[in-house]
Image: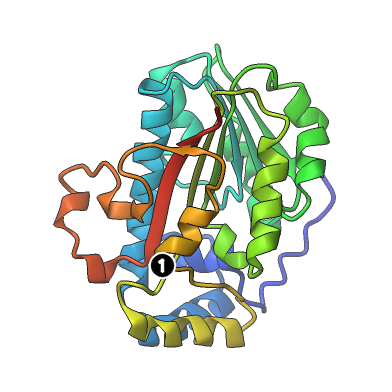
Amino acid sequence: MNPVDLRTHIPHPARIYDYLLGGKDNFQADRDAANRIVEDWPTLPVSMRANRDFMSRVAHYMAADLGMRQFLDVGTGLPTPPNLHEIVQDVTPDARVVYADNDPIVLVHARALLTGTPAGRTAYIDADLRDPGKILGSAELTDTLDLTQPVAVSLLAILHYVLDDQEAQRIINTLLEPLAPGSVLALSTATTDTAPETSQGVAVANAQGITSKARTRAEVEALFTGLALVDPGVALVHRWRPNPQAGTLDDTQVQMYGGVAIKR
């Protein structure tokens, strides 16, 4: 593998996320940026953890309740146990998982995403969310997943970096169009509905080059157009089929909506 330029002097979304979750794969520029954002968005670390817990519940639900055996996770982020493949392969050891991300720090750690069960398979694609055609056409995907059978696509905490709603919808439609009926979309994305004052934190992040868009519940629901949302529909991530831990959070602490829907 060729050396990867991590540009450690420039704050990076994946490393900021890692820092706020208590990880160690970050640099001073990331920590400084995160601390400035949190000054105006103090609940951000809680919200990020709530989203990570949402991922765990959603992955288990898709494998155990919906019977999914194939998964495409786009915008994977830094490996943080339990990773999606660990959750779904605990339910179904022969589950197949393809991860896709274009963050250089994630590429460095990609081997940690390739340690699945002997019966299952995992693969990693170095590709941009904004080029879904490249993801679908990659050898890593076509060698791992059978697109004639349902696939679960997860876009978790990534679409808020796509500022244009039409572009976000294009990405979703392109990823789902070739997939078999019964395929599933899981997504989560940022909002300021529950704490409008956190919009200043979004502005601080944007000023540091971490550009993102907070969406209303109606705007998030629109991203599922043409799909059948499962109960409870689009909800704050800690309210989506909560476990006891998630139920202890107050709505004002969480600025992420999430949902799961099925392609008919």
The residue that mark 1 highlights is 20
Where in the figure is residue 28, as x and y percent of width and height?
54, 78
The total of numbered circles placed on residues is 1
The amino acid type, in three-letter code, at marker 1 is: Leu
Does residue 4 sit above or below 182 in this rendering? below
Q: Quadrant of residue 260?
A: top left
**Residue 83 visible to an observer of this rendering:** no
Does residue 167 sit above or below 98 in this rendering? below
Regarding mark 1 in the picture, which secondary structure is present there? helix
Q: Residue at x 64, y 52 (%)?
A: 106
Q: Residue at x 38, y 36 (%)?
A: 230
Q: Residue at x 43, y 83 (%)?
A: 199
Q: Quadrant of residue 44?
A: bottom left
Q: Residue furthest front?
A: 226
Where in the figure is residue 224, as x and y percent of width and height?
52, 47
Along the horizontal axis of the image, is 179 left or right of 112? Answer: right
Q: Quick one: label 1, few (<14), some, or many (20+) residues within 10 Å?
A: many
Which is more toward the observer, 63 or 118?
Answer: 63
Q: Quadrant of the C terminus?
A: top right
